[in-house]
Amino acid sequence: MPSARLSVVVTRRLPDVVENRMRDLFDVSLRETDAPMTREELVEAMKTADVLVPTITDKIDAGLVGQAGGNLKLIANYGAGVDHIDVHTARQRGILVSNTPGVLTDDTADMTMALILSVTRRIPEGLAVMQSESWEGWSPTALLGGRIAGRRLGILGMGRIGQAVARRAAVFGMQIHYHNRHRLREEIEQELGATYWESLDQMVARMDVISVNCPHTPSTFHLMNARRLKLMKPEAVIVNTSRGEVIDENALTRMLRSGEISGAGLDVYEQENTANPRLRELKNVVLLPHMGSATMEGRVEMGEKVLLNIKTFDDGHRPPDQVVPSML
């Protein structure tokens, strides 16, 4: 007799092509609506499933992992970041965790450049003028922004996405600087034309644009805190397409309101689904609803990674994108 198919629970709606492939391979429970699961629904899913496929909107903490049933052996995250999953507790319970690294690199880097240009060239303000039908024609002094060529870009986190941002920014004529937990190899620095700063404080104080591209970990929580934000030049801007928790959002809001920082472009927020209401009032801030990975190609590739991780696990092997605590 053929072995029973894996029981897989998916917590959010995924692209049709991904859901159809899951139906072909597994005994899958798909989400009928795109609303996040409640905690009670997550508990029930983890009690019954062999594999859970969560997203960033699902908080899989120690309390939730502790209620997992004996069948749950893999949490195959749909996304690269795993800071919403208690990987340590999962490992203690014998539950593997996998993610989908690499597939969103170019999409997120593109969005980083879009935010840099949007903030420095005041694109949303121009859109608002046209949508309000208040445009009275071209003026030599209207909506003056700044040229990004020649500006110093400081990249906080020089992994895959940080390096992809560096390559794009260099084409625009920006000077590339970076701070990272580990310095890149010399040949990569030379390829990127990047200058390494061991001191984040010194880099922040000298940059025209700061791009946050590091993951959220205990060591990066509020890495850009009030003290460090105050080191930025008044004419500098900051963009974040990584994790909202890396920036002290309240401190950033105060400084943007007071003109201590020229502008910001944010695609992520400390409270995942809620931007600080005071940020919405500011003309020098561009806010996006976590769109960094929002391309059809990227979301399908994420699904393909999830499928590969589950299928490899089902075949008795280690998932190729397994996450272990030492990686965090």
Image (cartoon, rainbow, N blue to C red):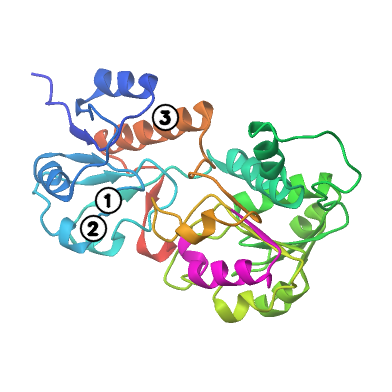
Query: Residue at label 2?
Result: 90
Q: Which of marks 2 and 3 is nearer the N terminus?
A: 2
Q: Is mark 1 on a helix, strand or loop?
A: strand
Q: Dot 1 corresponds to which residue?
A: 96
Residue placed most toward the observer, 322 or 244: 244
The reply to whether the C-beta atoms of the residues labelled 3 and 1 are less than 8 Å apart is no
At label 3, which amino acid type do we have?
Glu
Q: Which residue is drawn at 56% across and 71% down?
A: 254
Q: Which circle's residue, 3 or 1, is located before the other in the chain?
A: 1
Q: Distance between the residues labelled 3 and 1?
A: 18 Å
Q: What residue type is labelled 1?
A: Leu
Tell me where the magenta segment starts and ends, as one range: 244-265
Tell whether position 150 is magenta.
no
Residue at (50, 26) in percent of width and height: 296
- Quick one: quadrant of the N terminus? top left
Disc 3 target residue: 304
